Amino acid sequence: MATPSGRRMACLHRASPAVEEILLELHSKAKPMEVDHNIYEAGSVRYHIKGSASEAQELYLSITIPSLSPEVLPVKDLQHNTLQTIRKAYSSVAEIVEPPREGFQLTLRLDFRKFPPRKDDCSKLIAEIASLQGVILSSQLKDIIWNLGSQVPVEGMYRPIKLIYHPREPFFVIRMTEKIIAIFPMRFKDDSDVILATAFFQELMDVGSSTTWAKAPFCSWSPIPPPELRGEPFHDLSTNAGFVSFEILSWHVEGAKLDKTVWCLLNFPAYVKYHIKCTRGFIQRRMRRRLERLAEVMQKAKEDEDGYITRQEEKTRKIGM
């Protein structure tokens, strides 16, 4: 797989949990059985898993998803480049069925006979198959930005392109002659998350401006919409944590770097949430330890006070005797 999955954190794991669970269960069962599952996930993503008792070693996995950007890529059919990416990713164990199942954009025929015999390898492969949505969307984003690397002028250059990877979390890319600007409107439910996020964004800017990270995409944060988004709908620009922007230059999308850049862009909001969750947990642990130490000090002080009172009472009793 092209995605740098070896570095994934748990929160950025892009496999569909339901699809992964069903495929693991079906592969582990030896006896033939009829299978017909419809799976609905957030963001209008729909899967269908079909298996027949007469073809126990074959399974059909279908998917339909909204386009990453309906204004740039057609919603109904997958692009040729996306289909080629899928063929390359799963050619060892699956093939594309044409035409796909009715009502779906893509159908794969999985051949269990070609799955690796080792359990760990098989589980890893199934996780990659269950990541089909991420493969499609990554390919679509590549189609949108590949022109930067080729330096070919494209229609819609300088106009913000709205992309939707996660529901309710759109972001924008603006193609320019020598760079692409990716802009993320950031929204959080809790005020405490807003505070942690803005502190993280400011730290990200400070680190990014250092000489150590001079080759990384330039990062900026603003509490108000950047000029590039002027004219966009108000509801897309309504945030409580501002806007994070990255400047993607041509060397960030050369060769294998393109896969890594696409993965980072698609999962930046998830990474921010992961950072906030870890930071909140760290703060809570620190506060808990401080409370425990304070309780120990107060308990010791109480014991010392009780001991002092007991000694004074004993002295008084002896004097009275």
Image: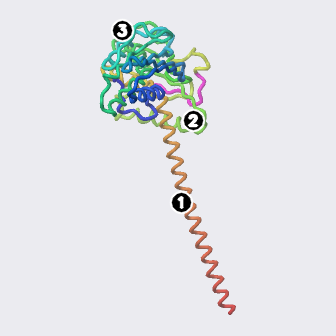
Q: Where is residue 6 in the image (x, y as percent from the top left)?
A: 35, 32
Name the kind of residue labelled 1 in the image. Arg
Compared to 77, does 258 lie above or below? below
Residue interval drawn in magenta: 237-245
Q: In the visual, does 22 lie left or right of 311? A: left
Kind of residue sitting beneath label 3: Val
- Label 1 vs 2, first from the N-terminus: 2
Q: Quadrant of the C terminus?
A: bottom right
Image quarter of residue 32: top left
Tag 3 near tag 1, CB within 8 Å:
no
Quarter of the image for the N terminus: give it. top left
Q: What residue type is labelled 2?
A: Val
> Marks 2 and 1: in contact by CB < 8 Å?
no
Quarter-of-image position of residue 78 = top left
Question: What distance separates the C-alpha of mark 1 from that of mark 2?
Answer: 29 Å
For the residue carrying disc 2, how many other residues have a C-alpha within 10 Å: few (<14), some (14-19), or many (20+)?
Answer: some
Q: Decide which of tag 3 and tag 1 comes sooner along the chain.
A: 3
Which residue, given by chain and number where applicable, does mark 1 sit on? 293
Q: Which mark is residue 194?
A: 2
